[in-house]
Image: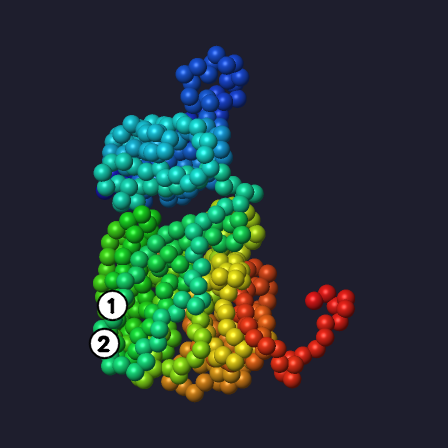
Amino acid sequence: MTRKALFPLALALVLAAAMFVTLTTGFALAKTSDPAANAGAEAAAATLEYTLLTGGDTGQLVFVGVGGDIDGVINPTLTANPGDVVKITMINGDGMLHDVVIDEFDARTEQIADVDAQDSITFTVDEVGEYVYYCSVPGHRQAGMWGKLIVGTPTGDSATGADIVRNPADVPAPVGDREPQTVRVDLVAEEVIGQLADGTTMTYFTFNGQVPGPMLRVRVGDTVEIHLSNETSSQFPHSIDFHAATGPGGGAVYSNINPGETAVFSFKTLAPGLFVYHCATPSVAHHIASGMYGMILVEPEGGLDPVDREFYVMQGEIYTEEPYGTQGFVHFDHDKMLAEAPEYFVFNGAAAGLTADDTALHAAVGETVRIFFGVGGPNFTSSFHVIGEIMDRVYDQASLTSAPLTDVQTTLVPPGGATMVEFSLDVPGRFILVDHALSRLERGLVGYLMVDGDPDPAIFGGELTEGSGH
Ligand SMILES: [Cu+2]
């Protein structure tokens, strides 16, 4: 009890000490213009300083940033520019044995276990890249004591990350007419630095490395056996909630797992439909905004009518500290998320994600198209619309047991909801998928349906007037 009561005070003292150290070092920096004074004075050469406190008051095996932009941030991402001399000071805040190591720079503090004891590493970063700092005491990195040092991706420099956009044609084959069975599904929670836009990257939380997670396809009456693993390298716990499941949390009660763990649970599909699944680990909205959502199609008995092309598209919002269009690595902004003020709106995870030739939807005149469309969100309802098309059939709210709406221009899809739309293609050209709340188009929400074939002037014809611009 006493120890607990004293702890915040101890922490305050540590923080004060850390600030004092930073201040005095700052003075030292200012004063050491005499080269002789630099001899053996490593700290004075540092152009960038960070302080990390072990544990802090979190009760977890983590580093907590002290001072500046990283103050209070768990496992903060440290940034530097090539040529910087970086000093990282570790202060022991929990009385357990720890160190800070960055392999690439051969930088390693002493291992210290005394509360308030500290040590630092100073090294020069030359190469642009992403590095990991971690505690090398056995088990500590796995338990969560690691973070990133990113060199050379500040605002203004473009960045490249993993391609996280799921191809909209990545749809499983129809189930069709078969008896119910047990279907095993393996999912992996993966945290990746992915390409948000041209020259812009961010940390995504994904199922199986892409956004949305894989489309799953079963029939009503099937038992779905989920094996969810959380990668060892993850920094957060993750879980999964299936809207297709009947039971508390949609499965989240069985699946909240730490890095390195695997959960297994099953549910029976009692109703057909197109259902969203998503991570349900708090802050749930943060995990969803980072890309952790997907859909499962539960086909009715006998399956769906065949069509020529099926596509899988999901909409989401992304909340970053940096304004829309900023180059480089951008950071998640919790306040903007609570204010529901996103910087980006995305189809399949990235700004303009479905406009490249290899990620656009492709079809031909005379074909029938079915789009499985859902909203991961977390917050914004979509007014889903395909510019230049009329949807022949809309399975409103993704209900497959109701008759579809016919001849629809725009359909509403709420967060955590879906729709199934079908239409035939009469003329060629580029048809544009949007949310008809069109401000969002200017924040990245756009996809192309490219249709090949011969024009039919009886359906759509005319002449481009000279000077009309387009
Ligand atoms: Cu998660």
Using the image as rendered, state which of residue 125 and residue 145 is in the foreground: 125
- Direction bottom: furthest residue: 403
Q: How many marks?
A: 2
Residue 38 numbered mark, or none: none
Residue found 29% across the figure and 37% down from its top: 135
Give yes or no for contact between labels 1 and 2 (Cβ–Cβ under 8 Å): no
| Figure check: 467 above or below 82 | below
Farthest residue toward the front? 454
Give SS at disc 2: loop
CA separation in Å, label 1 and label 2: 10 Å
Q: Is residue 186 visible?
A: yes
Eyeballing the image, is 243 above or below 378? below
Front residue of 250/230: it is 230
Residue type at tag 2: Gln
Percent of width and height locating residue 144: 30, 45
Query: Is residue 284 visible to us here?
Result: no
Q: Quadrant of the N terminus?
A: top left
x, y (%) of residue 360? 51, 65
Residue positioned 45% across, 34% down in the render: 127
Quadrant where the C terminus is found in the figure? bottom right
Give neighbour class at mark 2: few <14, some 14-19, many 20+ (Cα, 10 Å). Answer: some
Task: Rate crowding at label 1 as few (under 14), some (14 to 19) or many (20 or more) other CA atoms within 10 Å.
Answer: few
* Disc number for residue 181: 2
- Disc 1, SS: strand
Up-down: is 109 above or below 439? above
Residue for point 44% across, 71% down: 311
Q: Position of residue 45 (x, y in %)?
A: 46, 23
Relative to 170, 250 lies left or right: left
Relative height, residue 434 to residue 238 (above, below): below
| Residue identifier under label 1 | 184
Q: Amino acid at mark 1?
A: Arg
